[in-house]
Image: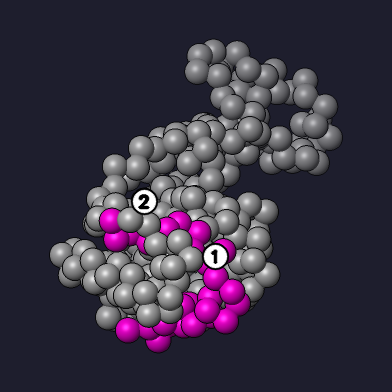
Amino acid sequence: MTCPFLHEAQVKYCRTATIRKLIPLAQAGRTEEKCASAQHRTCKVFQTQPPMEECGVLGPCPYLRESLMQYCGAAPVTKLVPYSESLLSRCGNDSFRYCELYLSMARPSMAEEDVDGMAMPDRLRYTSNHMWLDVSEDGVCHAGIDAFLSRVLGPIDRLTFVQLKGRHRPTAVLTVSGVDLEVTFPNPFLLTCCNLYLRANPSRLTYEPYTAGWLFEGQPSPETLENLLEGAAARKWMEQEQRRMNEFLQQEQVAQSGTMADGGLFAASLAHRLDRDRMLVLFHEFFSPYAS
């Protein structure tokens, strides 16, 4: 699947010009254009070049080149990119679902599955410390935090990426109420990109955890997929996690502070209602890479 905003354009350019200017070809009347007809001999750039024996009198300019380009129709400024370039590679596969421009322009509907009110898309795999992984058909993966963790966190003050590229267990540091909390994908993969937009607007991490709030992009290995949950097993695990959270809050006497919602689902922005020590205890229990 390709991005609906990905477009193609056939362009021409002069091989000898000082500055390469890409000009979209007219759909009709190409033979009347100066470069494609005998009029090319009146071009000042052509006249400065050494004579070419194979250059015909009536044919197109021998320095005329054509190329098929692609560009993003959602971008405010059109930038033509050759197919050989990797800049727009995301547009040609399922990864476009995580593109900032696509999300802001298309505003795709989020018809997500949920478990007792907790959003949990079936197409994703989940880790025991409440992160998700999405692997596209061409082998590119995206990872982020799930709705359970985003509900606990609430608004985030600051986000910092520990690594930007390389083979790692990718980690980000989230600052909540002045407390630094590390979220780490528990299995390693080749990290190729981080969602740097989140540094300017970290709230998207918790408000849109499965789309614009993605954290890491990379190339997975078989090890990356080990011990991940999906399908019915993931839904059953989420039900257990919600019960375990409520039990934990009761044991920590957090319920008396009014942080538990009636009906069993814990209150949103829970981390903001805890002191530093209890926040760290909760985070270690549920969201460390070694959480069970």
Outermost residue toward the front?
256
Left or right position of 277 against 285:
right
Q: Is residue 276 above or below residue 268?
A: below
The quarter in which the C terminus is drawn is bottom left
Badge 1 marks a residue whose secondary structure is helix
What residue does disc 2 label? 94
Residue at (24, 71) in percent of width and height: 240
What residue does disc 1 label? 273
Which three-letter amino acid code belongs to the residue tagged 1?
Arg
Pointer 1 or 2: first along the chain: 2
Note whether residue 49 is visible: yes
Is residue 267 part of the magenta span, yes or no? yes
Which three-letter amino acid code belongs to the residue tagged 2?
Asp
**Position of residue 228 measured from the top left corner of the image (x, y, whole percent):** 28, 75
Outermost residue toward the left?
232
The residue carrying pointer 1 sits among few (fewer than 14), some (14 to 19) or many (20 or more) residues within 10 Å by Cα, namely some
